[in-house]
Amino acid sequence: MKFAFIEENRKTSNIRHLCHLLGVSRSGYYAWRARPVSAHRRHDERLKAVIGELHQGFRRCYGAPRLHRALVQRGWRCSRRRINRLMRELGIKASSTGLYQWRPGRQALYSSTSNRLAELDTPRRPGHQWAGDFTYVRTRQGWLYHAVVLDLYSRQVVGWSFGRKRGTELTTSALNMALARAHPVPGCLFHSDQGIEYAAHEYRDLLRSAGLVRSMSRKGKLLDNAMVESYFHSMKSECVRRRTFNDRIEATAKIVAYTEFYNRERLHSSLGYRTPQEYAKLCA
């Protein structure tokens, strides 16, 4: 490290003075300069080039675990610890780093009601358990509201919608898209929070006519719908964060593109580092 510091500053400072300050010999410095680059370091440089490409290709959202898995899938031999070190050297990190803080015990402050999802085991096939929620995104034109429906088996976004205002029309549009695309089994559980957008008669009638069974989170319990909250966390940190959309059309286009990326390309740690579409096909 001392020799590297000298090398970095040798053009603007006297070598003898720098060696004296750092307590190294000039002969040692010149021997270090003449030494060939090690095979380990050459491999590091090749890895750094690939890491930089992958990080850009995955919208700067991947951290060390997903980058490590992506590298292994491409035939590179490396450890996660090495990827962590090389990412620090490159000055890159996952776009979600530092975005949210977990505050344990906070949810205990809220009152609770029952929900059916908590009583069921993890689904073993697509189309058996769905969940929905909506969020909002700021644009220079105003707020854009975005509703989604997730299949809880594959974590795939099977339906989505956008609107200028929140309401039953927003959530029913997302559900109608999901019903047309994914075809759930009769008796599929649909879970949501207790918002009026999901409790309205129009929405309940749509669920009933589609053969879906209603389930709702306990009051104030965000973790009851954790998978959808996790998706919104990823979407906002990887697509929306540090970006200002000029209008709702631009925001809609970017989020739809991200949704396709999430479904088809993004490796999901809870799915064994498979994409949602790839995981769903395992049951085909």
Image: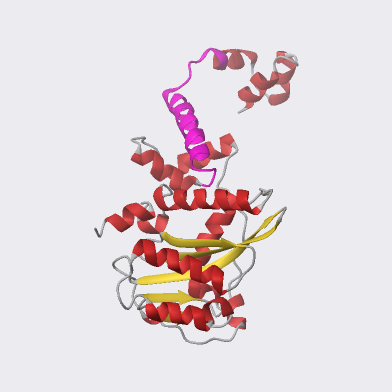
Please identify the dominant SS of the magenta region.
helix
**Compared to 196, does 29 lie above or below?**
above
Residue sitting nearer the eye, 100 or 186:
186
- Nearer the observer, 219 or 140: 140
Identity of the residue drawn at 40% across and 42% down? 70
Q: Which residues are magenta?
A: 33-61
Residue beneath the point at 52% across and 77% down:
198
Membership of 255 in magenta stretch: no
Q: Is residue 5 left or right of residue 209?
A: right
Q: Residue 262: x, y in percent? A: 45, 52
Foreground residue among 155 and 66:
155
- Can residue 101 be spotted in the picture? no
Percent coordinates x, y for residue 33 in the rendering: 57, 15
Residue 183 image-quadrant placement: bottom left
Q: Residue at x 52, y 36 (%)?
A: 86
Question: In the picture provided, is 280 more to the left or to the right than 230?
Answer: left
Display colour scheme? secondary structure
Quadrant of the snapshot with the C terminus: bottom left
